[in-house]
Image (tube, rainbow, N blue to C red):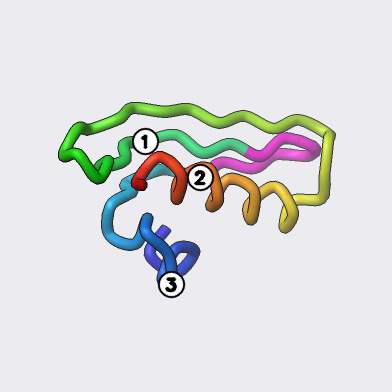
Amino acid sequence: MKNRTKNSAAYKKVYAKTGTVKGVCTLAGYARAANGHTLAFVILNQGSMSASTVRRWQDKVCEAMCH
């Protein structure tokens, strides 16, 4: 994750595990919000976009959770 969020608010605030199988891309873990709360999350995308587009979208969701 550190390479995926280097230039964002999520850098070093998201600890997550990725998972990819044909047509499915997942991300699950914890995010530290700006108010100090720890958020647990699971994101599962199936067959809706290319894997690279899904990863960029997941990164934006993580960034939003950290704001």
Q: Could you say where residue 47 lies in the image, as x and y percent from the top left? A: 83, 34
Q: Determine the residue positioned at 44% across, 34% down.
A: 28
Residue 58 is left or right of residue 64, and the answer is: right
Frontmost residue, 49 versus 62: 62
Which residue does the image show at 36% across and 47% down from the upper left?
Answer: 67
Q: How many marks?
A: 3
Q: Which corner quadrant holds the N terminus? A: bottom left
The three-letter code of the residue at mark 1 reads Gly
- Distance (Cα) linking label 3 and label 1: 19 Å
Image: 56 above or below 8? above
In the figure, 9 relative to 7: above or below? above
Does the stretch in magenta take in 56?
Answer: no
Q: Residue at x 25, y 42 (%)?
A: 32
Q: Earlier in the sequence, mark 3 or mark 1?
A: 3
Percent coordinates x, y for residue 49 in the rendering:
82, 44
Q: How far apart are the alpha carbons under marks 2 and 1?
A: 9 Å
Q: Write down the residue under mark 2.
A: 18
Whichever of labels 2 and 1 marks the residue nearer the N terminus, that label is 2
Name the foreground residue: 40 vs 19.
40
Rendered image: mark on residue 29 = 1
Answer few, some or many: residues within 10 Å of disc 1's Cα (few below 14, many 20 plus, some between 14 and 19).
some
Q: Give the range drawn in magenta.
A: 18-25
What's under tag 2, amino acid-wise?
Thr
Say which amino acid is labelled 3: Asn
The spot of residue 36 in percent (x, y) is 16, 39
SS at circle 3: loop
Q: Tell me whether circle 3 and circle 2 mark residues in contact (CB < 8 Å).
A: no
Q: Is mark 1 on a helix, strand or loop?
A: strand
Mark 3 or 2, nearer chain start: 3
Toward which corner of the image does residue 40 lie, by quadrant? top left
Image side of residue 22 versus residue 32, left or right: right
